[in-house]
């Protein structure tokens, strides 16, 4: 049985404490879920281990009540300690093969791709989805290489059958184009975290994604690689 449903990637919220404008992560995530967010990743680069774990446990309680999976960024120990449903790794994090050995088989694993070499290296890895990062320039991801763009996203789609989530500079104005290029969903930070009304922002994004996915289904795009 697959560890991951593609539907979980439709609207993937990545948290950012400072971007929440003084609101708690739990409140913003709960509002996003009410609006249609399908997955939440807790990313805390500067928190201590105890702070990170406390946030993870609190957020997991909120998400479990709504039936939405929690993904932990980078920290396998935190993912294990809070029984998160998923772990996401970047190119400088723990190697995928090591993480997979330590994780329960039920926990899904995602990996960020920043360039074509990362894509080539991902073939054969035991990951459940790939994050194309960043698709567009964004101030929340300043440690990555040049953006993939829509053509780069389509390039990735043509070369893997794994589910794809696109992240970086995505909002309601460009989300449909991202889905049309091959993404199974969008990951956003400020588009929800910094919105005046995170629930309404999530609802608008989810509607855009659902409509775009419906359009790709009608036009015959399969959930897998396109011809190269």
Image (cartoon, helix red, strand yellow):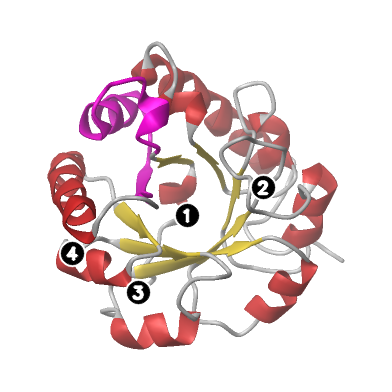
Say which label, 4 or 2, has the lower sequence index: 4
The picture quadrant where one finds residue 50 is bottom left
Task: Give the CA separation, mark 4 to mark 3.
Answer: 19 Å
Q: Secondary structure at mark 1?
A: helix
Name the residue beneath numbered marker 3: 1
Circle on res. 134: 2
Q: Secondary structure at mark 2?
A: loop
Q: Nearer the viewer, residue 101 or 160?
A: 101
Name the residue beneath numbered marker 4: 83
Of marks 2 and 3, the one in the foreground: 2
Say which label, 4 or 1, has the lower sequence index: 1
Q: Is residue 17 magenta?
A: yes
Image: magenta residue range: 16-44
Of marks 4 and 2, the one in the foreground: 2
The picture quadrant where one finds residue 98 is bottom left
x 69%, y 28%: residue: 174
Q: Would residue 202 appear left or right of 72 to someone viewing this image?
A: right
Circle on res. 6: 1
In the image, is residue 62 above or below residue 196?
A: below
Say which label, 1 or 3, has the lower sequence index: 3
């Amino acid at each position: 049985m697959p560890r991951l449903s593609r539907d979980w990637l439709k609207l993937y919220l990545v948290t950012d404490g400072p971007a929440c404008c003084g609101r708690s992560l739990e409140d913003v995530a709960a509002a996003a879920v009410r609006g249609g967010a399908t997955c939440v990743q807790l990313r805390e680069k500067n928190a201590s281990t105890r702070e990170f774990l406390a946030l993870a446990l609190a957020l997991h309680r909120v998400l479990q009540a709504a039936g939405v999976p929690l993904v932990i960024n980078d920290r396998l120990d935190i993912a294990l300690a809070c029984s998160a449903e998923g772990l996401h790794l970047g190119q400088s994090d723990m190697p995928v093969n090591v993480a997979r050995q330590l994780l329960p088989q039920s926990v899904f694993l995602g990996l960020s791709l920043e360039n074509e070499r990362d894509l080539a290296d991902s073939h054969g890895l035991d990951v459940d989805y790939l994050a194309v990062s960043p698709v567009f320039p964004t101030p929340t991801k300043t440690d990555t290489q040049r953006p993939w763009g829509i053509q780069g996203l389509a390039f990735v789609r043509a070369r893997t059958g794994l589910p794809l989530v696109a992240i970086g500079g995505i909002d309601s104005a460009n989300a449909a184009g991202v889905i049309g290029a091959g993404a199974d969903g969008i990951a956003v930070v400020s588009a929800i975290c910094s919105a005046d009304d995170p629930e309404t922002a999530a609802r608008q994004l989810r509607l855009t994604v659902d409509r775009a996915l419906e359009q790709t289904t009608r036009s015959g795009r399969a959930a897998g690689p396109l011809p190269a």
